Image: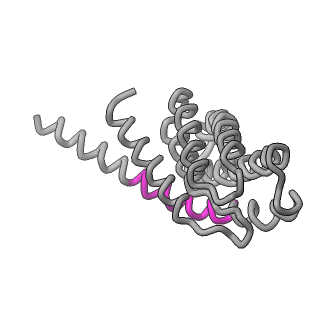
Amino acid sequence: MSTKKIVINSLLLAIGAILHAVTPALGLPMQPDFSLTMLFIIIFINFGDYKTTLASGIITGVFTALTTKFPLGQVPNLIDKVVTANIIFFLVLLLKPRMNKNLAIGIVMVIGTLISGSIFLESASILVGLPASFTLLFTTVVIPAIAINLVAGIILYKAIDISLSRVLMEKSKVKTLR
């Protein structure tokens, strides 16, 4: 992996971790997960790079475990992020070459957040128990998180995509001048 790729992915993971840490809980001890949004963007921009996907999933799981507001939610966060990263890797492989990238990232945000929320709630119910019913938590936390991640994910992806394309254009201009 190139140094530039490592730096970009590290910055995106750090931004996701900071956003996750400062996002307030939605009434119940659960919160929208912006680190998940950044994980999906990393998987999307590193198309086909499984090592990056797996490493990013593990790192995101650790970050969210450290900043979770869910009581004893550390292990469910690790499980959720690693499993979700693997599923989304294959979803991106399927979608990205076949459709507009903005539509594809929107679909990834919706399906990924749905999968992540479901895995988190199910693993938490098995390992530590839930503070309310699965259905109540799904409808009051996961569904709003899907909407939030969709909007935030598209905006963040567009900003990151524009930034990366400008950096690449500047780099090609420098090579042309030499």
Q: Which residues are magenta?
A: 146-162
Q: Residue at x 71, y 48 (%)?
A: 116
**Residue 174 relative to residue 155: left or right:** left
Q: Residue at x 64, y 60 (%)?
A: 69
In the displayed structure, 7 sits above or below 103; it is above
**Residue 89 relative to residue 52: left or right:** right
User: Overall secondary structure of the magenta stretch?
Assistant: helix
- Asked if the magenta segment contains residue 153, the reply would be yes
Q: Residue 130: which quarter of the image? A: bottom right
Residue 59, x across and y down, in percent = 53, 39
- Asked if the magenta segment contains residue 135, the reply would be no
Q: Nearer the viewer, residue 68 or 165?
A: 68
Q: Nearer the viewer, residue 178 or 163?
A: 163
Q: Nearer the viewer, residue 104 or 87?
A: 87
The N terminus sits in image quarter: top left
Q: Residue at x 59, y 40 (%)?
A: 96
Residue 94, x across and y down, in percent = 66, 35
Q: Residue furthest bottom?
A: 27
Residue 90, x across and y down, in percent = 66, 33
Residue 103, x across and y down, in percent = 61, 53
Q: Residue 76: which quarter of the image? A: top right
The C terminus sits in image quarter: top left
Indicate the colouring scheme: one colour
